[in-house]
Amino acid sequence: MKYVNADVIFPEELLKEIQKYIHGGMVYIPKPEGTRKPWGENSGSRLYLQERNLDIRRKYSEGSTIAQLAEQFCLSGESIKKIIYCKKTDTVKSHRS
């Protein structure tokens, strides 16, 4: 997060109004509702986990055991079960299409 001096970006009237509530301090101004990206969207983590989970489900349906999948993906058996038996279907928007 980048620090910006308020007197550079706010009109003088607005700055004076803000100074009625706080002066000489730092204030965080959040993004407007609905503009925040979901977790993992910037880093690609969300897409990676969706693809991994689809791979786990596919391998399970092809005959791999929970123990084999747990070892292959370095997850606990309980985590593998949650992925396999989850009713939510992951939709992957692949960048490769």
Image (cartoon, rainbow, N blue to C red):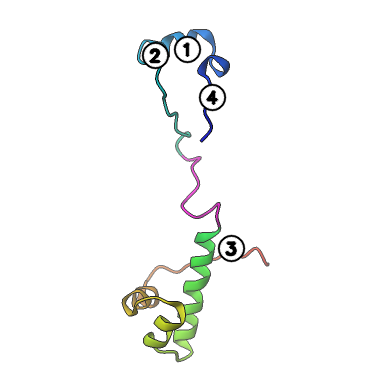
Q: Which residues are magenta?
A: 34-43
The amino acid on which the numbered mark 3 sits, given as a three-letter code, is: Lys
Quadrant of residue 43 within the rendered picture: bottom right
Q: Residues within 10 Å of mark 4 (few under 14, many from 20)?
A: few
| 3 shown above or below 48 | above
Q: Which mark is residue 15?
A: 1
Mark with earlier residue (4, 1): 4
Q: Which residue is nearer to you in this view: 25 or 41?
A: 25
Asked if the residue at tag 1 contacts the one at tag 4, i.e. Cβ–Cβ closer than 8 Å, the answer is: no
Residue at 51 percent across and 77 percent down: it is 55
Q: Which mark is residue 4?
A: 4
Residue 91, can we see it?
no
Cα separation between marks 3 and 4: 36 Å
Position of 31 with respect to 9 (left or right) is: left
Mark with earlier residue (3, 4): 4
Count of picture labels: 4
Asked if the residue at tag 2 contacts the one at tag 1, i.e. Cβ–Cβ closer than 8 Å, the answer is: no
Q: Which residue is mark 3?
A: 93
